[in-house]
Image (cartoon, rainbow, N blue to C red):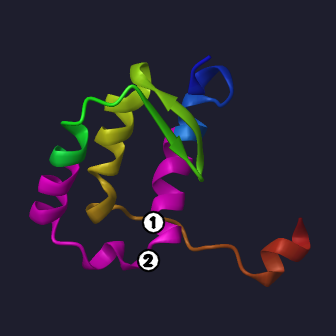
Amino acid sequence: MDVFSIVDPGAWQGGLMMFNCWNSPWYKLLDPAKFERHVDRVQSLDLEVVASCHSPVIRRSQIDQAFSLIRQVPRAAVPDQPCQTDLEAL
């Protein structure tokens, strides 16, 4: 079973970007070149499966796509987090 059998591809991509930025607000301070080198090192591990607290399990067929998205984090423009009035409206 892959991530797209559980979650719509667009929702997964948007969620991966949004939650990586929301959960790590310091992402705006990242040096893009240093971050890129770090991502290169991790991607070179040739992973088969990635388990995450904020995503369904990512299998080999989506890992390259996940790394591509993660590489965009230092330049990401993410919507504001919901505030109390948003939560009350739900």
Left or right, 82 with respect to 55, comes to right
Q: Are marks 2 and 1 in contact (CB under 8 Å)?
A: yes
Decide: is 83 above or below 90. below
Decide: is 60 above or below 70. above
Neighbourhood count class around disc 2 (C-alpha, 10 Å): few under 14, some 14–19, many 20 upward: few
Label number found at residue 46: none
Q: CA distance from mark 2 to mark 1?
A: 6 Å
Q: Residue at x 40, y 22 (%)?
A: 60
Q: Residue at x 45, y 66 (%)?
A: 21
Amino acid under disc 1: Cys
Secondary structure, mark 2, is: helix
Where does label 1 land, which residue?
21
The spot of residue 20 in percent (x, y) is 47, 60
Neighbourhood count class around disc 1 (C-alpha, 10 Å): few under 14, some 14–19, many 20 upward: many
Q: Residue at x 53, y 41 (%)?
A: 51
Residue numbers of the magenta segment: 13-39
